[in-house]
Amino acid sequence: METISTAEKLVATSGAPAYSDSTILAERRRSRINRQLSVWGLRVGVLAAFVFTWAFVTGQGIMDPTLISTPGDVGTSFIKQLGDGTFWVDVSATFSGAMAGLVSGAILGILAGVTFARVEVLHVAARPFLTLMNSLPRPALAPIFILWFGLGFGPKALVAFSVVFFVLMTSTMGALQSIDHDIKQLTQSLGMTRRQRFFKIELPSALPSIIGGLRLGAVYSVLGAVVSEMVGAYTGLGQRLVVVTNNFQVSETFAILLAMGLLSMVLDLSISGVQKAVTKWTR
């Protein structure tokens, strides 16, 4: 005779349905889909409300369309920009400068954060200089970099680097220093070397915070490149923005700002995918 488990007896006597793994997975999938639909519904609703309000205040004469343009004009200008070959040259110039600053700033910022977190004396000695350099306004650095390296690729990459470096250094140091002291004591009692403790305990624990800092640095890298281009450059979205603003082309100005925002969103979405993978791996 086949034996019947206690759990099966309870289910049979109570008349409650037995949930299989497939049923639980289906419910989780349904819940995830409903959540995504709610999120996108809110996004579309907020965007529609913003565009409607904008069109209403300009259409009713509450605000002068000459100063803030209209959603239709901005959309038309944005489509025209997409069909302009020089626009993509400017996008490429801004993106290349931002990426160079992001990659170099992230690598050196993470290395500096690890070094300062592991050698406290070095961090205490360097703290006043780091604070001084981080407090310098980036628009003030752009003319100096342009004076040194000209109006090309170098200044925008350096301004982006100056922002990303401190973001990644701070997030890396904070993540490594926040690791529980008891965990460190436990690894020492288990005889783990400093190298083993770093790669097996400290680095996996700090990775989510480091990737989060990288997402913030990606947005700031675009801002840094644009600021440098606005001060002086041959090509780039920042220089394009200065030209259309000086010519009082309001709809083109908002179209370029939209392009900058989309560029930052692309970088952020790319890194958020890495963040999800890292978070899943470190759990």
Image: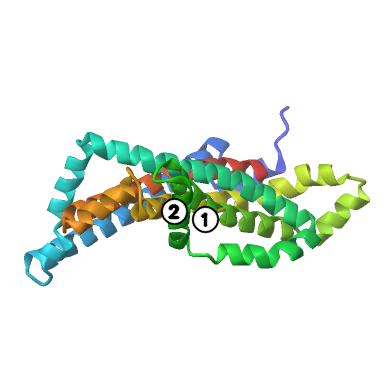
Q: Residue furthest top?
A: 1
Q: How many marks?
A: 2
Q: Is residue 124 visible?
A: yes
Q: Residues within 10 Å of mark 2 (few under 14, many from 20)?
A: many
In the rendered structure, the answer to whether residue 211 lies left or right of residue 251 reads right
Q: Look at label 1 and name its amino acid.
A: Val
Query: Where's residue 90, x and y in %?
Result: 31, 41
Q: Which residue is mark 1?
A: 163
Which badge, 2 or 1, comes first in the chain's sequence? 1
SS at circle 2 = helix
In the rendered structure, the answer to whether residue 115 lies left or right of residue 12 reads right
Query: Where's residue 129, x and y in %?
Result: 66, 64
Front-most of residues 247 and 7: 247
Q: Look at label 2 and name its amino acid.
A: Gly
Residue drawn where x is 7% and y is 64% of the image: 59
Residue drawn where x is 11% and y is 68% of the image: 64
Q: CA distance from mark 2 to mark 1?
A: 7 Å
Q: Quadrant of residue 195?
A: top right
Q: Residue furthest front?
A: 147
Q: Which residue is mark 2?
A: 224
Residue drawn where x is 59% and y is 62% of the image: 133
In the rendered structure, the answer to whether residue 93 lies left or right of residue 83 reads right
Q: Quadrant of residue 5?
A: top right
In the rendered structure, the answer to whether residue 189 lies left or right of residue 26 reads right
Q: Residues within 10 Å of mark 1 (few under 14, many from 20)?
A: many
Q: Quadrant of residue 234?
A: top left
